[in-house]
Image (cartoon, rainbow, N blue to C red):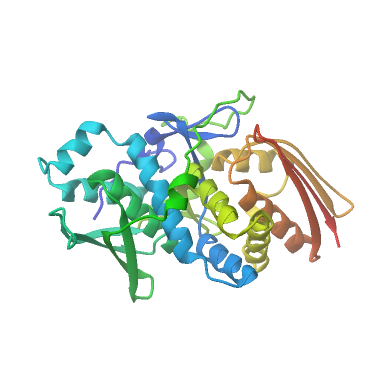
Amino acid sequence: MLEVTVCPECGVPHLFNVEISWLNNGDIVQRQNLNARAAFIECENLDPLFKNIGDIIGMPIERLVINITARGSERFNSANMPKQLVEMIRSKQIDIVPIAEAIGMRGQIMGYGKHEWIDYRYENDEDDFSVQRITAPFSVALIAGSYAGALSAAVGGEHGVSYKEEEPGVYQFRTHWDKYQEELKKRMAIVPYNHQEGDLALEPCPSCSGPKALSVYEWLPDQGQIKHRLSGHRMALLGPQLMDPVFSALQDELGDTIPETVVEAQRRFVRTGFDFSDFMGSEDNFRAGLALRGLGNLQSFKMAGKGVRMELDNACLPLLLLGFVQGTFELAFNIESNIEWDLAEDGRLELELSPK
């Protein structure tokens, strides 16, 4: 059993709150790296999203998503992993297994699924491998790519990954030496986060000082899951600096219509009945819900005549957010809609929805 220290007031694990910080502008950043933004979001949509994108464009994209994520994960982890630790791993002064197990434990607290380190070989030759079992991964594609990329950052070189489903919801991932496509190496630039001041404050927990609203979520560390106590929606802490480049690289690979395709794929998933009612309500509730997730600072949200206008500063994961808002709007009114949006370079997102 994974023993985790939690806040006696809100029930949030100490490790979760000390790793990230909620800012005054609707953003979340890593405390140890203020240039790295984070998002605490619903994650059950991610693999269906990739499938929907593939259905829309007429070809599966999972392998491409895995490869793109692996490259982004390698760059992200290389920038954040202490050089001394990397040198000790590569010179075999320390065993990689305890480090891998600690990373898996952290992943369970962040909602990534239950991790089990199974086996590995590390002799710096073509027969090297590592095997990990993950039960209920937050996203099969993203966790596969993240695993391969993190390994690349730790031991060097480039690694591919394959997986098989041992039983429903239980996956075994296996890595091997590989080569990334040269095009992906050029595209996967990690853009540092630049803070913009805001005037937004979430009510703090009187005990741990994290957002009090986190108390509506239940941490299940042994299962590697975080769930909303009422809706049952599963959550995970993700890095937009890894997610957004995935969509950018998909656009480079598959064409300029990918942003619209991502929005449409997300809309389709929400329309299947993925209820976000806890997220909506008043404009103040919507603003707080976005900020708790680190998705930005809502400036205005108007719904009139079955239309919606929204303005959001510091937008995070904007394509997913657009599809979510459109799908939720259509569910609420049982209509089809048209969507128009503009995303400025400074992160300001403007959205307009109207009935078809």
Q: Nearer the viewer, residue 7 or 305?
A: 305
Percent x, y of residue 119: 17, 62
Instruction: Give the quadrant of residue 197.
Output: top right
**Residue at the outermost bottom position:** 167
Percent x, y of residue 50: 54, 64
Q: Nearer the viewer, residue 142 or 252?
A: 252
Residue depicted at x 56% and y 52%: 247
**Quadrant (top left, top right, bottom left, bottom right) of the N terminus:** bottom left
In the image, taking residue 196 as reference, residue 124 lies left or right, namely left
Residue depicted at x 63% and y 68%: 57
In the image, taking residue 80 as reference, residue 177 lies left or right, namely left
In the image, taking residue 304 as reference, residue 175 lies left or right, namely left
Q: Which of 128 and 115 is in front in this view?
A: 128
In the image, taking residue 239 as reference, residue 279 lies left or right, namely right
Instruction: Give the quadrant of residue 342.
Output: top right
Residue depicted at x 23% and y 50%: 100
**Residue at the outermost right position:** 305
Instruction: Give the quadrant of residue 343.
Output: top right
* Above or below: residue 151 compared with residue 20: below
Residue 111 makes an appearance in the image: no
Percent x, y of residue 6: 35, 41
**Residue at the outermost left position:** 93
Percent x, y of residue 123: 12, 54
